[in-house]
Amino acid sequence: MSESITAKDRMRELEAEVRKHQDLYYVKHAPSISDRAFDRLYAELQQLERDYPEFASPDSPTRSVGSDLDNDFPKFTHTIPVLSLGNTYSTAEALAWARKHLQNDQEVVDIQWKVDGATLVLYYERGVLKRAVTRGSGQVGDDVTANALTIQNVPRKLKKPETLVARGEVYMTYADFESFNETMGGVYANPRNLSAGSLKHKKSREVARRPLRWAAFDASFPEKKGRARPKSDRVRLELLRELGVPLLPDNAFVPGTELEQTIQDFEKRRDDMPMPVDGLVLKIDDLDRREILGATANTPRWATALKFEPEVAETRVLEIEVAVGRTGRVTPRARLESVQLAGTTVSYATLHNADQIGRLGVRVGSFVRVSKRGEIIPAVEEVIEVGDGPEFVYPDKCPSCATTLVREPEAVDWLCPNPECPDVLLNRLIFFCQRKQMDIAGMGEKICRILFERGFVRRLPDIYSLHKHREELESLDGFGQKSVRILLDGIQTSLERPFRRVLPSLGLRELGPFVTDVLLRNGYHSIQSIQKLVKKKGARDILEKIDGIGPRTSQAIVDQFRDPGVLELIKDLKKAGLQFEETAPAQDNNQYPQIFSGQTWCVTGSFESFHPRELAMEEVQKRGGRTVSGISGKTTHLLAGEGAGSKLKKAQELGVQVVDEPEFLKLLKKKK
């Protein structure tokens, strides 16, 4: 096999791994590898794309920002780009970044703590908080305003009637986290996961109980008559302070000559910080210089993150085990000689997949380094000494049902293809009932295991027949009338979950909340419409033309919705009463005629009738249009206000229809 073919295969593997871990981190708030391990995968993919650009995928995860979008919240298109940061773990590399981008060694650099929380963007209009939006995809975020209003130090009203956008971080101090977690029985893993998860809680009154805090690290101010445009980030942050906006602690502004010493001073204070910090953010202070430097598709050139090295421990591998998940994926893990790491005793660490075992060269008896950054699942980072134990041979049979394992094309995982595999059925049941899925009260993992082992529930539709076994259930040890009533009530309530919740809860490959939302936004509002699509000739091509769906996802959708077993499962769940069609809220079509249906609008500049300009974007959305934050070949219209700049030029170059404010207002008055 040639080097180029090997590189292409490796690129496809890395794309799948990076997407998976982005979903675990941003959406599920349950990362399975350390930041350092993820960054290595990401950097390897970036390097291969530079070396072999002819094999780079147009939808590569290196070309987009990791997304935390959730189907349970309304979407909002950011009026500013909310980008991720490039990063390094080396002070020398951070200093090299500064030398490259500073005009001279006296130019000022801002240094801030990189707080390990969740990004939240606040939109103020004339001094009043109008919206709080998660980072989302960097262009579109989840509107979590109701939850953000429960955070005590988030200003509802500024000290002056300013219009601005403030980017900041939601976090929790260690002391607050420990106190709250103790009252909850210690169910939460760490402050970061709890902070991020709280923003997406369905009940604002529950969020109000959680000791969340928010602090700004950046802001954007619109042009204003009579006020000079801020020339530096220091001035902009000082404006925020004067308006009563909380800022991150210890912001420093130093010339390039003092950068190295300042980094060392910050690192000395790292262990004394009251909240989780996982590094430093370095930013060019001069705002004009930032505009000149610009950004790549998803990272600014004028800023970078210097991440702290994760805490590691050394120990020996006693055994390598494999487990089968709900999709049939067979995952290896190492049983270790117990070791203390990040304040806990670690006895197991993930090995991710068979290829990772091969790359690491790990075997029984190996001495390894294990990391646990941010109190996540421990992972084997590297092998120090191979050891004299036998080389691990990945099983060719499923450890649960003895079915021969298979490997999908362009994938790194081995799968059990048996849909009746006991471990697959059990883990699918546990997943289906989870809070983030169908949220069935009374059916936690322990109860799911009991019901599965006793034979009451083997397949998902069996859940909705449990009421027939009420007396038998009440006679089981640990159940009783009250717990059975809660369980059956929870099952009945789950029948009300919307289609956008039901579809990802089925546990099908590649069909998580993000892909479900993509399908819904593109007109596939029912299970019937998806089934009708996959029957068409060229179904994969149709799917791959949709933004957000790549070859692997399209293949998984087509394969699974042609699978008789999946079709039978859907038929039985539909018969049980689950929602398999999205019901759109009733609209007054006389008030909002869908005149922009099928159109994609971008908005730029300032307007007399829309303060801030996202109000104009809302008018487009009400009338059936889609809004985006950047101009591309798929953009159909640009609403250009006063001061429209580069977006107007690009729209003209691409032949995008440009609409001014008076013309837009006339369009809004149309009835048809």
Image (cartoon, rainbow, N blue to C red):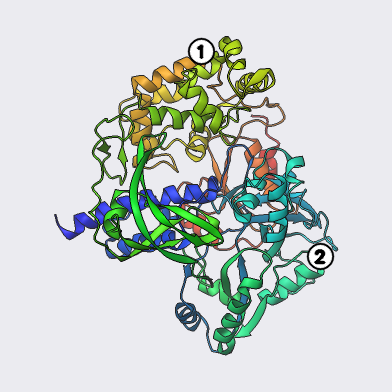
Rendered residue at 60%/26% (across/down): 497
| Residue 439 appears in the rendering | yes
- Which residue type does callout 2 highlight? Gly
Residue farthest left in this picture: 1
Residue 435, x across and y down, in percent: 60, 35
* Above or below: residue 580 compared with residue 299: above
Left or right of 16? Residue 346 is right
Earlier-in-chain disc, 2 versus 1: 2
Q: Give the residue pinned by disc 2.
A: 244
- Which residue type does callout 1 highlight? Lys
Left or right of 382? Residue 484 is right
- Density class for disc 2 (Cα within 10 Å; few <14, some 14-19, many ≥20) is some
Residue 575 is marked as 1
Left or right of 650? Residue 201 is right
Residue 152, x across and y down, in percent: 79, 54
Residue 166, x across and y down, in percent: 70, 61
Classify mark 2: helix, strand or loop. loop
For this rendering, which residue is in front, 154 or 534?
A: 154
Rendered residue at 76%/46% (across/down): 209
Mark 2 vs mark 1, CA separation in Å: 55 Å
